[in-house]
Amino acid sequence: MERSEITDLLEIINQQVSSAILGGRDDDYEELESMGLIIIHREAVQWSASITPAGIAYLGHD
């Protein structure tokens, strides 16, 4: 995933308290999670993601 794609997804997640993971983007979200930028909440039927402090720093919002 390119930096602009990462930034775009992180901005969307950051604007929402908990961002629903959209179908077809699972791999992108899992990549962001492996980078430590988000946490995926898998306890519900509809998975959601929230941004981590590392994700906020990546966006430069620290």
Image: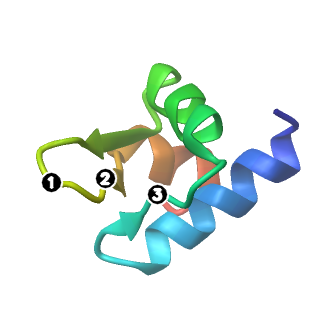
- Residue 7's mark? none
- Residue 47's mark? 2
Q: Position of residue 3 (x, y in %)?
A: 83, 41
Which residue corresponds to the image point at 47% horizontal and 79% vertical from the top-left?
15
Q: Position of residue 9 (x, y in %)?
A: 65, 58
- Earlier-in-chain disc, 3 versus 1: 3
Q: Position of residue 29 (x, y in %)?
A: 54, 41
Which residue corresponds to the image point at 60% horizontal and 67% vertical from the top-left?
11
Which residue corresponds to the image point at 22% horizontal and 41% vertical from the top-left?
42
Q: CA distance from mark 3 to mark 1?
A: 11 Å
Q: Is residue 23 visible?
A: yes
How many C-alpha atoms fall within 10 Å of the one at disc 2: few (<14), some, or many (≥20)?
some
**Farthest residue in the left direction?**
43
Which residue corresponds to the image point at 34% horizontal and 45% vertical from the top-left?
52
Question: Amino acid under label 3?
Answer: Ile
- For label 1, the SS is loop
- For label 2, the SS is loop
Is residue 18 or residue 26 the one in the foreground?
26
Q: CA distance from mark 1 to mark 2?
A: 6 Å
Image position of 60 (left or right of 4): left
Q: Is residue 60 visible?
A: no
For mark 1, what is the residue? 44
Question: Amino acid under label 1?
Answer: Ala
Q: Position of residue 38 (x, y in %)?
A: 41, 42
Q: CA distance from mark 2 to mark 3?
A: 6 Å
- Residue 21's mark? 3
Picture quadrant where residue 8 is located: bottom right
Is residue 20 or residue 9 the one in the foreground?
20
Is residue 35 or residue 57 the one in the foreground?
35
